[in-house]
Image (spheres, helix red, strand yellow):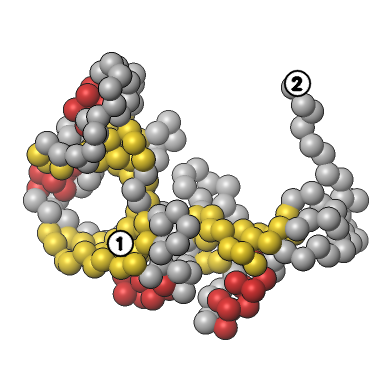
Amino acid sequence: MAYATLTTADLKSDYALLKKQGVQFLSEPYGTPGNRFVFMRDPDGIYLKLEESPIPKLAEARDQIQIMGMPYIGINVSDVDASVSFYRRFGYETLRWINEQTLSQEESAAWGFDQPVTYRGADVAIERGDHHRLRLLQWIEPFDPDPAYPPPINHKGINRLALTVPDVERAVRILEEQGVPFLSAVAPCCSGTDTDTGGIVHAIDPDGTFLELVGNLEPRPVAPQPEHCPPLEIRYPESSL
């Protein structure tokens, strides 16, 4: 997963305010008023794209950040056609293709490149629920073939997408019939007792990106610990109240 996008009503003021607070940016804002963007990094170096949209500004003082939402999350893929086909199995039926384009040297620099870049892609969105959107980008030139993070997902950065389903076991059965690989069987979550009514499981997209499915699950007996493991003990943090 490459970056998350944040929408702002006033990129110029947000850029100045965040820069004053020590946020690291890759470049000056690029584009024209109402259609500008700039990339920044969080404390671990993770990319965030700040994108301006012609939405109403907040009425408060200019020292308040104007960020209004997260319109999409960007995922780098090696074959956008294969990835669109994969994500459609999860309900991302709304589709808008991004035709192949080559960015200018100036715009490429705003993305962090030192040369003009070429990419194609697609926006896919869920038709129900929160209608969130993913931007699948296939970088043509230059292309980095390094694989996505292998399991486990304890690396820095965006580690997975969490998707809600009504019945997690039913969802897994349907997806497995379509050839979707999973990291493990469905695991009850998260008390460690036989009263859990929810479950989780991780699917893997064609490039190794993790998708977590979270949904209802029929309660079941707790599986015994393997002989080489100590007895299972669930500890909850003490309340501060």
What residue appears at the point 9 percent right and 48 percent down from the top-left corner? 105
Q: How many marks?
A: 2
241 shown above or below 1: above
* Quarter of the rendering containing residue 33: top left
Mark carried by residue 214 = none
Viewer-nearest residue: 76 or 222: 222
Local crowd at mark 2 within 10 Å, few (<14), some, or many (≥20)?
few
Residue 59 location in percent, x, y?
A: 28, 22
Amino acid type, label 2: Leu
217 lies left or right of 52: right
Residue 235 location in percent, x, y?
A: 82, 39
Q: Secondary structure at mark 2?
A: loop
What residue appears at the point 74 percent right and 51 percent down from the top-left corner? 190
Viewer-nearest residue: 12 or 28: 12
Amino acid type, label 1: Asp
Residue 194 location in percent, x, y?
A: 86, 58
Mark carried by residue 123 = 1
Q: Earlier in the sequence, mark 2 or mark 1?
A: 1
CA separation, marks 2 and 1?
Answer: 45 Å
In the picture of the structure, the residue carrying the numbered disc 2 is 241
